[in-house]
Amino acid sequence: MNVRHRTMKTGIAAVAICLLAACSGGGVSHGVPATPVTSPTAGSLVPMTTSRFTITVPSANTATSNSRAPKYVSVNTQSVVITLASVNGAPFTGSATSPASIATNLIPSTACVSVGGVLTCTVNAPAIPGNDVYNIATYDQQQASTSPSAPLGNVLSQATNVLVNVTAAKATTVTTPLVLNGVVKSFALAKNINGNASDPHVLSTGTQASPAYSIVGSQSYSVGIVAEDASSAMMFGPGTPTFSSCQSGSSAITATTDGGTCIIQVKSFSTAPVMLTFTMSTGNVVIPFTTVQELWVGSTAGFVNGFIPGINAPIAGDEIIIGSPFAVAADASGNLWIANFFGSVVAAYSPGAGPIPIAADTITLGSGRSQGLAFDSSGHLWISQCTLASICEITAYVPGTNTPISADTIGPNANSAFFGIAFDANGKLWVTNGNTVQAYTPGTSTPIAFDTITGPGTSSTNFFGGIAFDAIGNLWVSDDTNNTVTPYVPGTSTPIAADTITTGLNQPFGIAFDAGGNLWVANSGNQTVTAYVLGTNTPISVDTINIQQPEALTFTP
């Protein structure tokens, strides 16, 4: 019997399951000599012979081994049951003194040697001279009997109809190699995602029997799918299902096949699970994916960080170092646009692709200092900017060009202070301008008079910064001086008092709504980002984020 090995890029420890005689040098196959053995139950000699097998159970801490045998033994294997099914074509049922099945617990003993956590065991099985056919199975529990009628635990791997030519006096050639195939219990995403042992953007939300995953943000992810046995160990080797293609059941997530992986990317937020179908050699596997918006926070300390809502720590790797990010916005493709106030540029980044901006999308503003960003329904990017001489204007760009759309420019206006900008459902552009909020029809430089908001307090005490619309069209404005975030019905200058937020705020500036309708506020005064359920005045404590000098907020997708 030849014992073949293959090299894998990643692996578990080398696993060997072979006839003991076949493990000798030179790769030459030998038969199994027929010799008397002690009965595992009676403790005396019986007129039976044995086939001897060597089983090596790998250790979990040897998962980086580069060599694997083409056979499967789970790291969680606890026992093996070997059954002599027939001899010379006749069924073998055994007897009280000669059982057909022998169970062996794979634990350190005189027959099981442990080296570095790898357990190598010599296992005896019943044998009778002639053509013996065996069925072999490994289990995730130890057996209570040496010949159980119903073995305990789950089957992890097995082989059936293994033919061994047993002779009474001499070794003969074994023509069929012993190979255990893993028994698939479930499927899961590969643990190695995008080169990381555990990608923080892919969250497990299901169970071993019914896996489900959430994808955070709009980055593109290369994922694999693996079969797992009943003990949750990843399977490999003969009989393991192989991947061929993947497809998505919704436009919210795209799925394309690239060799042995599936490339998935979130295109839009979806409250309903999106079913991704992975085509395997054994049939289709359907795994539900939900989406989680990634919260991006711009800090005037010189960086932009990505967060998973509800977790008060930035996502590892999702940090962009940039001078002074006064505003952030996401386009329909999931790219992140950042207004660098002191750098007089607006740059686009592909989340997850590193800190280098997309060169073709970088917009230079000359002497202008960018302070606000917003995309219109056509995908044009609008930028509010002011010079050191307080000459302010709002200009529109086609992403990928560095020339303003002249017909859409608002201003320049002297003594203005354009900051936050946002579009309403009707396409009007709303702008915070110091102590007022004004609305414009794109292409005109004169504000719509009846849509001007002066807000609470006196004009000298108001400083409006951030601006955003909720799902029903109310306009929310942050007041840095009065420490409030106040909603208005567009066309009125009277705040909706019952919904005004005052608790937990300290110099609020950037504001943004998530897909669930909660309002998030960047407080530069107490260096927090707080979230609120509309109609309440108390922050959602689990969603509070501590971050240095937060200024701007946006969500992807």
Image (cartoon, rainbow, N blue to C red):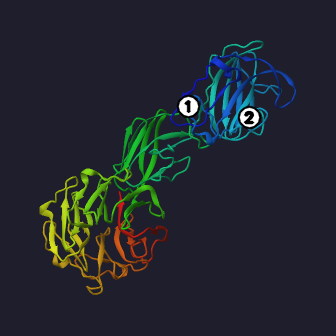
Compared with 77, 360 (above or below) is: below
Distance from label 1 to label 2 (Cα)?
24 Å
Res 306 → quadrant: bottom left
Q: Secondary structure at mark 1?
A: loop
Q: Is residue 447 in view from this perspective? A: no
Q: Residue furthest bottom?
A: 458
Q: Which mark is residue 113?
A: 2
Callout 2 secondary element? strand
Read off the residue under disc 1.
237
**Residue at screen point 13% across, 69% down:** 444
**Figure quadrant of the N terminus:** top right
Q: Quadrant of the C terminus?
A: bottom left
Residue 139 coordinates in the image, percent (x, y):
67, 37
Using the rendered view, name the quadrant where residue 388 is placed: bottom left
Residue at image location 61% in from the left, 39% down from the top: 62
Q: Label 1: few (<14), some or many (≥20) within 10 Å?
A: some
Mark 2 surroundings within 10 Å by alpha-carbon count, few (fewer than 14), some (14 through 19), many (20 or more): some
Number of marks drawn = 2
Q: Between residue 462 and residue 104, name the one nearer to us.
A: 462
Q: Is residue 439 above or below residue 119?
A: below
Task: Say which residue appears at 86% left-offset and 30% top-offset.
Answer: 42
Residue depth check, mark 1 versus mark 2: number of the one nearer the observer:
2
Q: Amino acid at mark 1?
A: Gly
**Which residue is at a point 30% across and 69% down the rendered structure image?**
469
